[in-house]
Image (tube, rainbow, N blue to C red):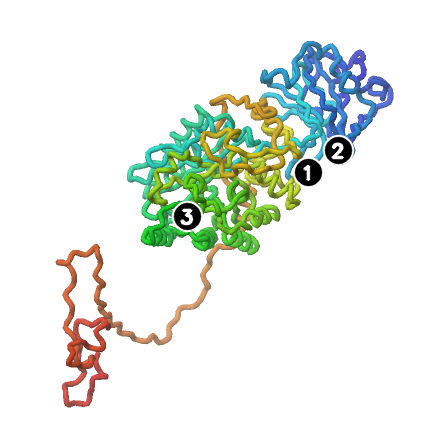
Amino acid sequence: MAEQQPGATQDEHLLPVYLAKPGTSSPKPRQKYGGMFCNVEGAYENKTIDFDSLSVGRRSARSMGRKDGSQVSIDSDGLSETGSDVSEMSGSCEPVDRGEPEAGQLDQSPSAQGEDTLHTSHTQSDRLLIKGGKIVNDDQSFYADIYLEDGIIKQLGDNLIVPGGVKIIEANGQMVIPGGIDVHTHLQMPCMGMNSADDFYQGTKAALAGGTTMIMDHVLSEPEPGSSLISAYEQWREWADSKSCCDYSLHVDITRWHEGLREEMETLVKDKGVNSFLVFMAYKDKYQCSDAQIYDIFSIIRELGAIAQVHAENGDIIQEEQKRMLELGITGPEGHVLSRPEEVEAEAVYRAITIASQANCPLYVTKVMSKGAADVIAQARKKGAVVYGEPVTASLGTDGSHYWSKNWAKAAAFVTSPPLSTDTTTPDYLNSLLSCGDLQVTGSAHCAFTTAQKAIGKDDFRLIPEGVNGIEERMTIVWDKAVITGKMNENEFVAVTSTNAAKIFSLYPRKGRIAVGSDADLVIWDPEAVKIISAKTHNLAIEYNIFEGMECHGAPSVVVSQGKIVFEYGTIHATEGTGRFIPKKTFPDYVYKRIKARSKLAEIRGVPRGIYDGPVQDVTVVPRAMTPIPSARMSPAKQPVQPPRNLHQSGFTLAGSQADDHIPRRPTQRISAPPGGRSNITTLG
């Protein structure tokens, strides 16, 4: 930038700003003939100018960055104007020549002397400059540099004017994507007197290592009289605030219908930042709600402007099938999947969509595990239903053939509900539906238990704690199974791992997008990285990984959360308790625009008619008393006395048993006329 001329400080708005439309590859200086704005030689060179005379944060442009592999840190008392050269990731690696300084020239500037590079210093700075990256959002990709300050994206573009003392991260042509959002986790979840293996510290640390910078955990209260959703919510907040390493939000699971439920839900929505509630169609006699209760809950959720979530399985059928498996002597993990055929998931999904449509409530189906359930969601969306489907890491990356492993511990590690499909083509099918938009969001449903914890159910598969890992592997699995195979592109990958979740749960564009003003949650993604998943190298507290030995392509190189480097080339720098609770607003436009439109069209009106004054048929209704069927709940002393048999209506045999013994009898009979008159047995009243 040219030297300042007298009077420049009075005309601060005349300072040069390099503009470029999204997707362009070169800066375009704003021209003004004469004075300091003339296009002079060396205009792109680094200069140190008076920081106080400038307003930082409003100058941005879009172009390409550098791909030379160097690491640069700059420290200056004033401002540094930076430039960079980066070629396209695919094809040639030749730098783009725009007359800008080489990487070495930047390193040799006085402001860079004596500073540590990114590889040699782990000191976290409140100011970061990511250079030479390909920014990928859900709707576009372009090359630009990114300046972060105070946990916020301040500038996008090339030749950014940034303050001194920033830490520079060289993306080297790799993708820079929004931090992943895992919409479904169960960290530190109470279960049968214990907790899941990964607490909020261990779980969120693993999430960051996999490129996820925000989680949404499920609050699960005990379904006991007197239990409170609000007290359970406060307990989860206490756990997460003290241990979480990344931002988080909460869903609240409704485990018991009671009279005060509406008031609790209103408090959670209006005062606690919750906008999503989950109901269970499974776990009979514990969490399961009836269809009528689900309808009432969905109606409340719609009025509050929240999102209804559902765990969709037919709990009545599952309970009967579990009994049948035990009667057959099947007690191992295979009994879990045999008692939960795919049809019970598909049927429950269809029923949930039907109930939600009648209540005009948006529906979010968690843990889509089978082809049948996914097809039901896809068909409902084609008919206009406001429903979203969430396949999880496990259903996208593996299958249920492992339930028949001879190794009990391995088979038990895969136990989750709904179970993984035994059809080995299901993961590919779900990835296809995810790629074409029939399924919209990916979660992990991470709820990991150690082998010792799983062994509680060694003699009864019903007692095996349900849950699998996936919080660390989620983004890599999706990239490997969907992007590498050509099913989806990089923008769609961002959508299903981050942006769609942010839109559905009213966090967009604060989360799920790289834009000025968004949170500085970013991932430098290496699409060429090769990673072999193993329990020996994962960041979880469990000793078995359900993706053990799987070779995947695509992994994070650097992860930035809240504007700080938390993961860098395999090393985690996360700090316990730094995660923030992110409240979710009600009535997200992405979801409720259609709901509101339907509410206007669905107003029920009667047909105006005159009063009917014609004849009305007199009808005499004679109630028929049926013999109650004895049940185990009825005391033998209280069972009703059998009515006397009507011999006029039965055949007689010497054997004593009558042909119509199976027909229920009425207590009395009225004869229309005495014997010998005009009546016969066919005129009995």
Disc nearer the start of the sequence (2/1): 2
Q: CA distance from mark 2 to mark 1?
A: 15 Å
Above or below residue 303? Residue 380 is: below
Residue furthest to the left in view is 637
Q: Amino acid at mark 3?
A: Glu
Q: Nearer the viewer, residue 547 or 436?
A: 547
Residue under pointer 1: 140
Locate residue 116, reporting x and y percent.
65, 13
Gap between marks 3 and 1, in whole Å? 45 Å
Crowding near pointer 1: few (<14 within 10 Å), some, many (20+)? few
Which-is-in-front pick, marks 3 and 1?
3
Residue 295: image tag: none
Front label number (2 vs 1): 2
Asked whether the viewer can see residue 530, the reply is: yes
Label placed on residue 88: 2
Query: How many marks can you see?
Result: 3
452 with respect to 550 (left or right): left
- Looking at numbered disc 1 in the image, what kind of residue is underneath it? Gln
Q: Which amino acid is tagged 2?
A: Glu
Q: Is residue 386 left or right of residue 678?
A: right
Decide if residue 358 is in sight here.
no
- Residue 334's tag is 3
Residues at discs 2 and 1 in contact (Cβ within 8 Å): no
From the image, which quarter does the C terminus lie in?
bottom left
Question: Between disc 2 and disc 3, whose residue precedes?
Answer: 2
